[in-house]
Image (cartoon, coloured by chain):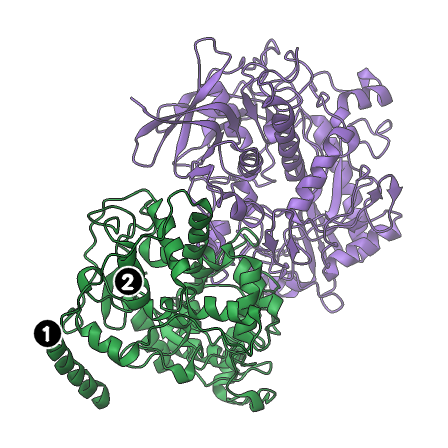
Amino acid sequence: MHEHKSLLATLVRLLLFASAVIVPSGPIMAAGIDKQDFGQIQRGRYLAVVGDCAACHTLPGSGHALAGGRPIETPFGTMFAPNITPDPTTGIGAWTDREFIDAMTKGTGRNGTHLYPAMPYTYYTKVTRDDVLAIRAYLNTLPPVYNPVKADQLPFPFNIRTSMIVWDDLFFSPGQFQPRADKSDEWNRGAYLAEGLGHCGLCHTPKNFMGTDKTSERLQGNALQGWFASNITDDRRRGIGGWSISEIVDYLKAGHGRKTLGTGLMAETIGQSTSHMTDADLKAIAVYLKDQPGQNAGNNEDRTPAVASDQPIMKRGRSVYADECSGCHAGDGKGTEHLFPALDGSAVVQQTDPTSLLHVVLRGTRSVGTDKAPTAAAMPEFGWLLNDNEVAAVLTYIRNSWGNTAPAVSAEDVRKARHAFVERSD
Amino acid sequence: MARRLPHKDVVIIGFGWTGSILANELTDEGLDVVAIERGPWRDTATDFPISYAQDELRYRIRHEMFLRNSQMSVTFRNNANQTALPVRTWGAFMLGNGVGGAGLHWNAEFWRFLPSDFTLKSHLTQRYGANFLPDDMTIQDWGITWNDIEPYYDQFEYLCGTSGTAGNLRGEIQDGGNPFEGARSRPYPTPAMKQGYGHTLFAEGARKLGYKPFPQPSGNLSHSYTNPLGVTLGQCTYCGFCEWFGCANYSKASPQTTILPVLMRKSNFEGRTDCEVTKINLDNTGKRATGVTFVDSSGEEFEQRADLVILCAFSLFNVQLLLLSGIGTPYDPQSGRGQIGRNFTHQTVAGGLGFFDKDKYNFNPFVSAGAIGMCIDEFNGDNFDHGPLGFVGGGYIGQVQTNGRPIETTAVPPDTPAWGSKWKQALKDNYLSTINVGAACHGSMYSYRDNYLSLDPTYKDRFGRPLVRITLDFHDNEIKMSNFLLEKYGEILQAMGAKQVVKHPRKPPYDVTAYQTSHLNGGAIMGDNPGNSALNRYLQSWDVPNLFVMGASAYPQNAGYNPTGTVGALAFWSAHAIRSQYLKNPGPLVHA
């Protein structure tokens, strides 16, 4: 905590200094967009889906695609995604292509302003110029919507946009994706998508106190917005090590694997983005992710639970499980394929951070419905029924039964989560 | 003045089984469809989650899922000499409300009718002669045959994942199934449910007497199942909370578990809940429906115009809306003329108790399900010779005990005090060792001239519209039939080894306060000409050809089975006719 505060103070000093820096805007680039180029526009549409622009830039229920206004939660406060329709005054209609490319790949807005990395330019910097222009070509075809959005309403010092210059200097390394010669074309395509437009790490990579990726723990899971985005490395226990390539593709396509369902923030990502991607691209992403090394490779076959089954918390958890959970998830924790997730061997259940489990049990959740798997079964909320001790016990039980192992959940963890969820508006 | 909404291709009134089926079929056709539902939106995790779904007090005793009588009720009398009174709390039948309708709270007993049921009048007349039937019995043929409807039974079963053992596969009798069923084109999509000890013992008793018991076809699934629409249902946990309840773990077939996940994703579908249709509007010729008027929960009135109107409310309310809208001619029991309200029927159900030695028998009655059970069909329909018996009709007999829920499962031997420590001891002694089946004899009710529906002259709903009035009583034929079934049931209980059998015969007059089933039928029946029916064989109104009327209101009389399998099959049959014939050439599909 002390360290956190002193670093923050350093940052404030830095940005006060940095605010004097003037960034010149570049010359207007010749357009790389042909309004008649249907192929480019359609490629752009697909890439906008891959990049999941709508996740932030479309306000659900507004009826206006990409007209902005959706609140985006960041560790530093709430921001509002801007309007990216071609409206000339409130959207990006008056932007030059060069300005658009810079925003996407360098995090600079018009006239040298600096974007916040809630806009994942730290990922989009890897995207090729052709692909960025294709996205622009597609955006140009959208109906312009007049919708002024006050994008940033952050508290001081984060409300000073030029502070981002410092942030960028510290944490942002621009540059297009460089394929690796020692890997297959498929791997490289997967890496390009996952590290670039797909921006998987924005949710799945742990962040340091400044909100930037801890590169040493890339894709190992991260808590955000009341959920824990799971480890998606090849780790057999907490990652996707136990999944085949085709299971990963099915999950991203249908939202439902044989043993698991997409819920929480991933439900939205699947529904709006990955379920609309081509099988070839999904397979490429799966190949790339499967090649991200797990963490406890030597330890994966260890079936010793972190909490022994004869502990009182496990006994209590077993009885709560029998009464409240076994009807759907089954006594053996194997669930029902395509309907009720298996808890036995589940990576979500065994994440070190139990935030998602607490969310699911206390508040309930609905899985994503897709064309391929429309059922969208839901988990009811149990927060009103189970007290903190019971939730802690049942979560500890499922995290340490059937060969699962993960740290115990305490009643205090549950109390804190309950409090945090009450504060949430979603 | 009603606010006029943008025109739709199709307006559906009522969003239960038939509304969901028709909406899905017609949106598949590319039509723009709106369904208007009187009750609320309902879904599994939010309305009957597993954390409180098994609450007998809330759902069974306090009627959580059902239409509130203060919103809409019916009036009842036994005969035309009485003045009908409004039903202020449901008794003889329970009427669903909200999305899913009765398809949400049913037991999911998933029967097909017999082939002869569809040609009942001709069949019985041919076998026994016209004089064999009571004078005032008004049964008739449906206008369709087994071969017409069989593919649609199949379609409904495969939508729902129905669990059962085939008895007649393409004409070949199968071991373990119902040998009396009509030839089916495919086996059931999932195997029959597991059976409890009491159910198994019933089958043994029935076999001893020479019958061929079989598992009841069930919409509570023995296995998880993914239907042709891609929707997955779970495996039944045998919790015993089905009838009156929503299923908390996705294992009972309902619109919610089979159709809605797909339908609700379609951009050409819209559902409006908490909106009550008050009238089907006609143009000035009276031969074409222009749409409907409905009122939302704020009291605002809307007009929804549409090319095609599909009436999918519960049977009673289908008839009420036809009468209120001036469609067809109201039935007059004096002259026998008019079709709307005619041939109203219910079911004739009887049951009983079998008390067994508590030291030898433990039935664990709480391990159960809505459509569990072993049945015999020897005495259903015309599966047996009625000649010497002096009645027609019949029913299945079964150990179909659906639950051992604590509030109502309180059977004690007849000589036990009604309260106090002796009652408690008797309850304790008998809870685990009693076979307790209210609907063990699930008998038919055939139609009669004096059983009908009409508009009540006195009692009105909140809009000032007359309530629908039921005029209904049991006739001797049904009582004889029911007593005959009960006799056979008692013999099987004895063969099972009961130390005491207590029969509860069905007695007239018909009692609107005592629960039987919620199988209300007729009032807007199908047939082969406008002189004997409200609807043609495709469930299309003879009077208003752009109006189709789904549901059990189309049954000319009721068979000895639960009606929903046939409700679903008829909906698919009608939907197929609309898709393949009507849309290509809108107009009457049968020329009278």
Image mark for residue A103: 2
Q: Residue beneath label 1, please?
A: A20
N-terminal label among 1 and 2: 1
Q: Is residue A301 visible?
A: yes
Q: Chain of mark 1?
A: A
- Above or below, B525 against B250 in this view is above
The residue located at (72%, 40%) in the rendering is B154
Residue A399 at x, y percent in the picture: 51, 80
Q: Name the spot of residue B35 as percent of width and height, x first.
A: 46, 34
Q: Nearer the viewer, residue A183 or B538?
A: A183
Give the colour of chain B: purple
Label at residue A351: none
Q: How many marks?
A: 2
- Quadrant placement of the C terminus of chain A: bottom left
Q: Which chain is green?
A: A
> Residue drawn at (58%, 35%), measured in percent from left and top?
B25
- Residue B134, compared with residue B485, is above or below; it is above
Task: Judge by depth and name the residue closer to the eye, B556 or A410.
Answer: A410
Check disc 1 and give the amino acid type.
Ala
Q: Give, as a three-letter code, the residue at label 2.
A: Ala
How far apart are the alpha carbons under marks 1 and 2?
A: 21 Å
Task: Name the quarter where the N terminus of chain A is drawn.
Answer: bottom left
Give residue B69's quadrant in the image: top left
x then y, percent, for residue A28:
24, 56
